[in-house]
Image: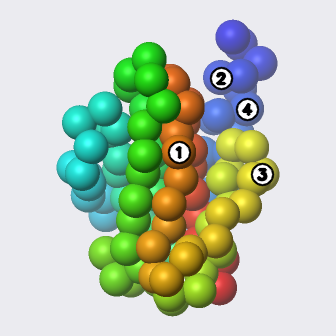
Amino acid sequence: VFDRMTQLIRVRRNERAFHPNGAQRILMDNEALFTIVRATPEGDEQVVCVHNVSGAPQPFRLAAAEIGVAADATFTDLLSGETFTMDNDILAVDVMPYQALWLKARA
């Protein structure tokens, strides 16, 4: 547990979007997913934090226009390194039970 928490803190400290003065907003498309979009104080970077708080896999869908990224943006999960690409302006990911994804868009 300690090693995992240390990793999470390290990732959080290295990302400007987690700055305490940065904007944040909550997306409420699925009641089993707690989703926050964090932005840098300058607004030039965002991280979409998706947390499945249920014991079942949950679909997560995000339109490019909803967070202002290019329709062909690629997202990297800051926690696992896995990458996801948009399909027809939509990011579609199945989030496993109790999984957290911190998705950062890459142009």
Q: Earlier in the sequence, mark 1 or mark 4?
A: 4
Residue at (71% x, 22% y) in the render: 4
Relative to 84, say whether 49 is above or below. Answer: above
Whether pointer 3 and pointer 1 mark residues with C-beta atoms closer than 8 Å, the reply is no
Q: Secondary structure at mark 3?
A: loop
Distance, label 1 to label 2, CA atoms, is 23 Å
Quadrant assignment for the C terminus: bottom right
Q: Secondary structure at mark 4?
A: helix
Which numbered disc covers residue 5? 2
Disc 1 packing (10 Å; few <14; some 14–19; many ≥20): few
Q: Earlier in the sequence, mark 3 or mark 2?
A: 2
Disc 3 packing (10 Å; few <14; some 14–19; many ≥20): few
In the rendered view, does 93 fall on the left or right side of 80? left
In the rendered view, does 21 fall on the left or right side of 97? left
Q: Earlier in the sequence, mark 1 or mark 2?
A: 2
Distance, label 4 to label 3, CA atoms, is 13 Å
Question: Amino acid type of disc 1?
Answer: Asp
Relative to 88, say whether 95 is above or below. Answer: above
Residue bearing the label numbered 4: 7
Question: Amino acid type of disc 3?
Answer: Gly
Residue bearing the label numbered 1: 94
User: Closer to the observer: label 3 or label 2?
Assistant: 3
Q: Position of residue 18 (x, y in %)?
A: 49, 54
Relative to 43, say whether 27 is above or below. Answer: above
